[in-house]
Image (cartoon, rainbow, N blue to C red):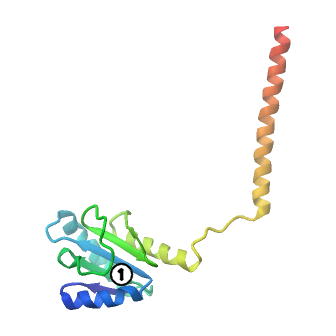
Amino acid sequence: MKVKHIGGNNDLQEFNDEFPKHNLVVAGFFATWCGHCKTFKPEWEKFTGEAKKSPLQALVATIPEEYMKGAKCDQTDFQGFPTVRIFKDGKFEDYKGERKANELMKHIKTLVSKSQRGGKKRRRSKRRRTQRKRRKMRKKGRRRYKRKTHKRRVRKRRK
């Protein structure tokens, strides 16, 4: 992965040029005055270190609050800082998982693997599905039979 730390207008311009070229972009938005950002910063640094070594094709950007308005990526609907936003194929999602470097890396790897396999869950064979349905129906049938026989017994007792 390619890692960008935006610290000036030149870095911001480079990020804006590279943003449309990548299918997957992970952007961390931070504020210097925010306490949560200060506690998350070491984990984010650890994540960017892992990302540099990773063979995945993505862009990881650290965007401080002062340069947010100049970034081309969508910065709307922030709930607070720090926000980790993952842009994939023109859409974005906010990362809501655990704020640990290894958890974030796992999440990104699952996103990449989903896109490589088409994102669809493998369905079970038709034969297995029909067998499961049959078992369910047998269970339902037994229950119905028990109810009917119980009702018959009750009616006989009443007479």
87 relative to 13 in the view: left or right: right
79 or 97, which is in the foreground? Answer: 79
153 or 28, which is in the foreground? Answer: 28
In the rendered image, the residue lying farthest to the top is: 159
User: Residue 5, percent across and down?
Assistant: 25, 84
Image quadrant of residue 77?
bottom left
Reply above or below: 18 against 25.
Answer: below
Image quadrant of residue 1?
bottom left
84 relative to 111 in the view: left or right: left
- Which residue is label 1 attached to? 50
41 relative to 130 in the view: left or right: left
Give the residue at x 76% y 51%: 133
User: Residue 67, percent across and down?
Assistant: 20, 79
Give the residue at x 75% y 58%: 129
User: Residue 17, percent across and down?
Assistant: 32, 90
Reply above or below: 57 against 87.
Answer: below
User: Residue 121, percent across and down?
Assistant: 61, 67
Image quadrant of residue 80?
bottom left
112 relative to 8 in the view: left or right: right
Give the residue at x 30% y 68%: 76
Q: Disc 1 on helix, strand or loop?
A: helix
Give the residue at x 36% y 77%: 26
The kind of residue tagged 1 is Glu
